[in-house]
Amino acid sequence: MSRVAVVYWTMSGNTEAMANAVAEGAGTEAIEVSDFSASQVADYDAFAFGCPAMGSEELDPDFEAVWNDCVPVFGDKPVALFGSYDWGGGEWMNIWSDAAREAGVNVADTLTQHLEVDDEGLVACKALGEKLAR
Ligand SMILES: Cc1cc2nc3c(=O)[nH]c(=O)nc-3n(C[C@H](O)[C@H](O)[C@H](O)COP(=O)(O)O)c2cc1C
C-alpha cells in the first residue's frame, strides 16, 4: 500500500467532505493544509490535494502557498487534485491542473463536485483514495 497524504482547505465544508471520503478510501485521515508543509512530502508516496474554487477561479491563498512549496518536491509521485465549485463550472480545476502539469507535477486525477458532495460523488472520492493507495 502506498502512503497517501490527503491535504485540503475548505471554507464551508464541501471540500472537507470530499477529503474525508478520499482519505477513507486511502485508509488514512485527511490533513488540513495548515497542518502540512513541503518538508512532509518525502514521507508519502502519493497525494490528493483539495481546494474549492475561490477568488475568481482561484485557489485559497493559504492553500496555494503550501501547494506552491510542494510543487518542486513532488518529483514523479502521483498527485490527484479535487475540490468543490459553484458558478464557474469547474474552470478553476482546468486552470489549476494545467498549471500543475506545466510545472511538472504528475497529475494522476482530477475530481470536482458542484457544491455539496452527493452519494455518487462520495463513491468517486473513495475510489480515488483507493486508487492512490494501490
Ligand atoms: C469567496 C468565494 C469565492 C468563490 N469563487 C468561486 C469561483 O471563482 N468559482 C466557482 O465556481 N465557485 C466559487 N465559489 C463557490 C465555492 O467554490 C463553493 O461554494 C464551494 O462549494 C465551497 O467549497 P467548500 O465548502 O469546501 O469551502 C466561491 C465562494 C466564495 C465564498
Image: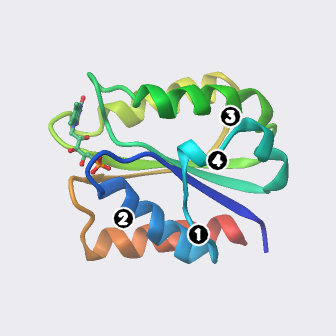
Q: Residue furthest front?
A: 35
Provide the secondary structure element on which disc 2 rests. Answer: helix
Between the C-alphas of marks 1 and 2, the distance is: 12 Å
Residue 17 is labelled as: 2
Provide the secondary structure element on which disc 1 rests. Answer: loop
**Residue at x 62%, y 69% (from the top left corner):** 131
**How many labels, in total?**
4
Q: Earlier in the sequence, mark 1 or mark 2?
A: 2
Q: Residue furthest right?
A: 42
Residue 130 in view: no
Tell me if mark 4 has few (under 14), some (14-19) or many (20+) residues whose alpha carbon lies within 10 angstroms of its own: many
1 and 4 marks in contact (CB < 8 Å): no
Q: Residue furthest left?
A: 87
User: Can you identify the residue that label 4 sits on?
Assistant: 79
Q: Is residue 104 above or below residue 9?
A: above
The CB of the residue at mark 2 lies under 8 Å from ligand 1: yes
Name the quadrant of the C terminus: bottom right
3 and 4 marks in contact (CB < 8 Å): yes
Relative placement, left or right, of 131 versus 38 is left
